[in-house]
Image (tube, rainbow, N blue to C red):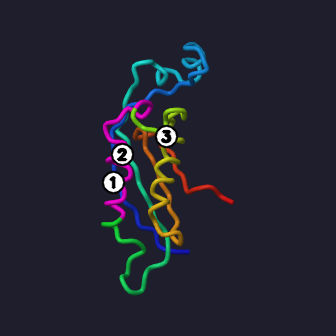
Amino acid sequence: MGVTVSRKAHFNAAHRLYRKDWNDQKNLDVFGKCSYPNYHGHNYELIVSVTGAIDEETGFVMDLKVLKDLIKIEIEDYLDHKNLNVDIEEFKNLNPTAENIVVIIWNKLRAKIKSDLEVEVVLYETSRNFVSYKGVVE
């Protein structure tokens, strides 16, 4: 067990939920108004939590300034004010659902955080709809 430290952040982005191999009616039936062809946007909120042992020398699990900078560079600068379907390589052939977005965010951050620390990302698409991801359980 360890201590968890967390950092909140946000970004704004547009997306469209649809499958290219489905016709408009099937997309509408499955994804509703989120499948409208001209996209729609969200003010995404995220919470990144890192859990681990407290370092005896610094007293930190992870320096929150380092976590803040990682989130800014890897997530906010990358996703903010973008059309996820058009501008973000990972979503060229992957439906940008909240579930898929949170996994992309987690993967980008996991690669930059020490492997002995656990990482969880909670992504709010709206104030009432949110998803979380802690990585794949093996």
- Disc 3 marks which residue? 90
Q: Earlier in the sequence, mark 2 or mark 1?
A: 1
Amino acid carrying label 2: it is: Tyr
Looking at this view, name the residue that lies furthest to the right.
Answer: 138
Prevalent SS, magenta region: helix
Q: Give the magenta-colored segment's residue range.
A: 67-86
Which residue is drawn at the image coordinates 44% and 62% (left, top)? 112
| Image side of residue 125 versus residue 72, left or right | right
Q: How far across and how far down the image is residue 47, in percent? A: 41, 54
Q: Earlier in the sequence, mark 3 or mark 2?
A: 2
Which residue is drawn at the image coordinates 33% and 48% (left, top)? 76
Neighbourhood count class around disc 2 (C-alpha, 10 Å): few under 14, some 14–19, many 20 upward: some
Q: Are marks 1 and 3 in contact (CB under 8 Å)?
A: no
Q: Quadrant of residue 86?
A: top left
Amino acid carrying label 1: it is: Ile
Amino acid carrying label 3: it is: Glu
Q: How far across and how far down the image is residue 22, in percent? A: 60, 19
Which residue is drawn at the image coordinates 38% and 49% (left, top)? 75
Q: Quadrant of residue 56?
A: bottom left
Determine which of the numbered discs, if any, sits on residue 15 in the image: none
Q: How far across and how far down the image is residue 82, in percent? A: 35, 35
> What distance separates the C-alpha of mark 1 from that of mark 3?
17 Å
Q: Considering the numbered disc 2 on the image, is that residue within a helix, a strand or a loop?
A: helix
> What distance separates the C-alpha of mark 3 from that of mark 2?
11 Å
- Disc 2 marks which residue? 78
Q: Considering the numbered disc 3 on the image, is that residue within a helix, a strand or a loop?
A: helix
Q: Quadrant of the N terminus?
A: bottom right
Which residue is drawn at the image coordinates 46% and 68% (left, top)? 4
- Disc 1 marks which residue? 73
Q: Quadrant of the C terminus?
A: bottom right
Q: Nearer the viewer, residue 113 or 57?
A: 113
